[in-house]
Image (cartoon, rainbow, N blue to C red):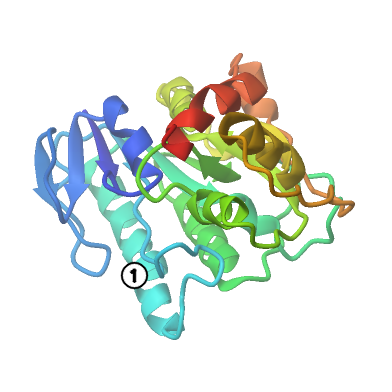
Amino acid sequence: MIALTGATGLVGRWLVPLADLTLGRTAGALPHRPYDLTGPAPDLRGVTTLIHAAFSHVPGKYRGGEGDDPQGFLTANLDGTRRLFDAAAQAGVRRVLFLSSRAVFDGMPPGTHLPETRAPEPSSLYGQVKLRAEEHLATLPLTGLSLRATGIYGPGPDHKWQGLFADYLAGKPIAPRRGTEVHGADLASAVRLLRTETTGGAVHVSDLLLDRHDLLAEVRRLTGCPHPLPPRSADPVSPLVCDRLTDLRWQPGGTERLRRDLPAMLGT
């Protein structure tokens, strides 16, 4: 049986089709057991694989998600996650797939080569929490896989580019930026491939290197918006090297998937 935390979140919603059971505060269509990051560990009887995607943060922020309560952020996301992983090991769960983040490298200079073998160096509290949870998972007698995912996009309420699109369509100035992205459905396909892995460790999950200029050019094409595009960014980027998923023949959707789903994100 596969159990999922964070099923109602912006990332977890993509993983619901892979689960048999959800663990959280809100029940959905699947069988459900109560769970909160700040409370005791959930009932994990019968669970063979646990997917942990729950995360407590200020709305709309991961880096900086502690807001004005860093201690509460640590209590929920580090202490709560450690408690969950310990309970999984005690309950005989065979495999844990933990949604970590590329933020475990955010203390490194832009342009750094980031294979899965590189030692992390986080500077943000978010990245530090993710890394310390990874390290705890690695000590337990089960297969622990830490999925270091980059920015996750896709249609749905409050999607990650909602504010950016609104600002561009309103004619507000847009700062140049480029970064790495992966579609939520491609994250789910990666998790699907990893459900039978017996070797733990880090797994990098990334697809596109995307410039806001190119993204908003697609928005302009779809909407006819007359506003100027931001200049292309010249800043170096540190793409994740996804060797483990490549070896498993993971095939993310790339630019084609982005273009296919943009109308839904724009409501057109």
Give the residue type that dot 1 points to: Ala
Specify whether residue 42 is in view: yes
Residue 260 in percent (x, y) is at: 53, 22
Please name the residue shown 58% across and 46% down the image.
151
Q: Residue furthest top?
A: 249
Quarter of the picture holding the C terminus: top left
Instruction: Say above or below: 82 vs 236.
Output: below
Q: Secondary structure at mark 1?
A: helix
Q: Is residue 255 left or right of residue 232?
A: left
Residue 219 in percent (x, y) is at: 61, 37
Quarter of the picture holding the N terminus: top left
Please name the residue shown 31% across and 47% down the image.
89
Q: Quadrant of residue 125?
A: bottom right
Q: Is residue 41 left or right of residue 68?
A: left
Instruction: Say above or below: 60 vs 71.
Output: above
Number of marks: 1
Please name the residue shown 62% across and 53% down the image.
168
Residue 85 in percent (x, y) is at: 34, 53
Residue 170 in percent (x, y) is at: 57, 56
Q: Is residue 244 left or right of residue 189?
A: right
Q: In front here: 34 or 14? A: 14
Q: Is residue 129 left or right of residue 168?
A: left
Instruction: Say above or below: 206 vs 232.
Output: above
Rate crowding at label 1 as few (under 14), some (14 to 19) or many (20 or more) other CA atoms within 10 Å: many
Specify whether residue 206 is in view: no
Q: Quadrant of residue 30?
A: top left
Instruction: Say above or below: 153 vs 249.
Output: below
Query: Which residue position is annotated with label 1?
Result: 76
Please name the residue shown 49% across and 30% down the image.
263
